[in-house]
Image: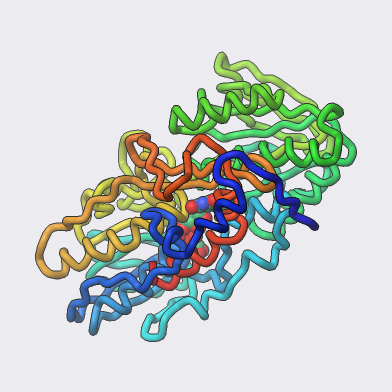
Amino acid sequence: MTTKRRQAPGMSRRAFLGAGTAATLAAGTGINLGLTAETQAATIKTSAHVVVIGSGLAGLGLVNRLRKQLDGAKITLVDAKKVHHYQPGFTLVATGIWPKGKVSDTNAELIPPGVDWVQEMAKEFRPDSNEVVTESGKVLKYDYLIVATGLQLDFGQIEGMDINRIGSKGLASVYPGPELAEATWKAMDEFRRKGGKALMTLPATPIKCAGAPLKMTFMLHNRLEQAGMRDRASIDFHSAISSVFSVPVINQEVLNRWQQANIPVHFRSKLVAVDIDAQRATFEQEDGSHLVEDYDFIHIPPPMRAPDAVKNSPLAWQEGPFAGGGWLEVDPGTLQHRRYANVFGCGDINGTAKGKTAATVKKSVPIVVDNLISLIQGQSPKVIFDGYTSCPLLVREGAALLVEFDYKDNLTPSLPGIKPLQDSYFAWLLKYRLFKPSYMAVAKGRL
Ligand SMILES: Cc1cc2nc3c(=O)[nH]c(=O)nc-3n(C[C@H](O)[C@H](O)[C@H](O)COP(=O)(O)OP(=O)(O)OC[C@H]3O[C@@H](n4cnc5c(N)ncnc54)[C@H](O)[C@@H]3O)c2cc1C
């Protein structure tokens, strides 16, 4: 697999390498790269018992920081998962850029000494009695709880879908894990050699890395072009909602680019069923009718929701737009639970308007820790999260848009010389080479 370095508009590779010292990179507020010294943060003495549920990026970042900042505390981490997946790398695996081995690490190496790791899943939350019950029936009492369970992929909402068949019959999804990302690349690679009809889809629910379905679409177009097969293939994008991205200015930029690339978009067209053997997809339209389309390649980002343990608990939103998915009812600013003051949420599980990304986790882990410390000290949480998120939106091999924004849809570029609507080699390099070290520094509580 080779990576051709194409000259991209925006900051060129040479200009970037010339100007791109570590200091320049680290200056970025949102996505700096783990090159700065460890954050100087307050340390307090406490005998509190803090339980963290979930050992993904948020859970790991939290326990590493808590271990350093809560002197004397008992810290318990609950999760059965032993392998840590670098999920932002899945799009690189699924488009033939990275081998799958680059996205797996071992949790045991990322959990600091002094943290009690309960290697099973939480089954029930009892916030009225400050208890969590694990799958084996163990009852964990806590003083403070942080929920960091991430989210649940819900392929079951698509009739006929079987993730075990990803990689054959043109069936693809970047989301479920490294093996299936690799299988997705196999299906894409086969399609780019044969050509035919591709259907790219977007579900109606909130999803993690909302840019990933768009990256897959741009990269499919690019892979076909590279193979000299673009004129022997069609690509149609079916969005279950009335946009392809929640930030209007980015949405328009993507639509403009797809118009030029001859990628028609069908709005309010929701994938509800797939016949894998017949290679046929059914889309529910706004008026309730069904559109049936044959395909040679289909990419399926699944509907997403909270894991059952959270969804079925008193911690979930009880009403409003986040209740259906069972998302955690947190204050979007402080990330404290709105009804249970000794509970916080961090990462994809949060029922907030934006931000199911690693970049959001990076920004919100220190905020949760600071606000928890205030609470332990008998004060109100003070630090307010602005909803920062970011996504290096791959547009072709060697170029990406560096999209950064907040809860209010403001664009919040954090690196000098980068224009959010102009693709660049630098944004590509960030995704291709520099984002993972930054991510691992977040997991280790250093950023
Ligand atoms: C294809 C793809 C591309 C992406 N690209 C980007 C990108 O370019 N940039 C970016 O910033 N972000 C990206 N992301 C998003 C990013 O990876 C996630 O937002 C981030 O990993 C969320 O971290 P988390 O800790 O909240 O959840 P996760 O990392 O998903 O971890 C959740 C953990 O909770 C555990 N858990 C679940 N239920 C329970 C339970 N009941 N009891 C105990 N433990 C439980 C799980 O086992 C898991 O270990 C991408 C994600 C994907 C899938």
Residue 271: percent from the left, percent from the top? 64, 31
Residue 18: percent from the left, percent from the top? 55, 57
Tell which of 322 and 429 is nearer to you: 429
Q: Is residue 279 above or below residue 66?
A: above
Residue 324 visible in the current orientation: yes
Q: Which residue corresponds to the image point at 54% horizontal and 47% vertical from the top-left?
A: 392
Residue 143: percent from the left, percent from the top? 22, 70
Q: Which residue corresponds to the image point at 74% horizontal and 29% vertical from the top-left?
A: 235
Residue 151 visible in the current orientation: no
Q: Is residue 433 above or below residue 394?
A: below
Single out the residue that lies furthest toward the right.
Answer: 194
Tell which of 143 and 440 is nearer to you: 440
Q: Which residue corresponds to the image point at 40% horizontal and 55% vertical from the top-left?
A: 28
**In the picture provided, is 280 more to the left or to the right than 134?**
right
Quadrant, the C terminus: bottom left
Residue 396: percent from the left, percent from the top? 68, 42
Tell which of 406 and 145 is nearer to you: 406
How are the residues colored? rainbow
Single out the residue that lies furthest toward the top.
Answer: 287
Q: Is residue 350 above or below residue 436?
A: above
Quadrant, the N terminus: bottom right
Residue 375 image-quadrant placement: bottom left
**In the picture provided, is 225 more to the left or to the right than 203?**
right
Residue 379 image-quadrant placement: bottom left
Numbered label tally: 0
Q: Is residue 427 above or below residue 106?
A: above
Tell which of 427 and 205 is nearer to you: 427
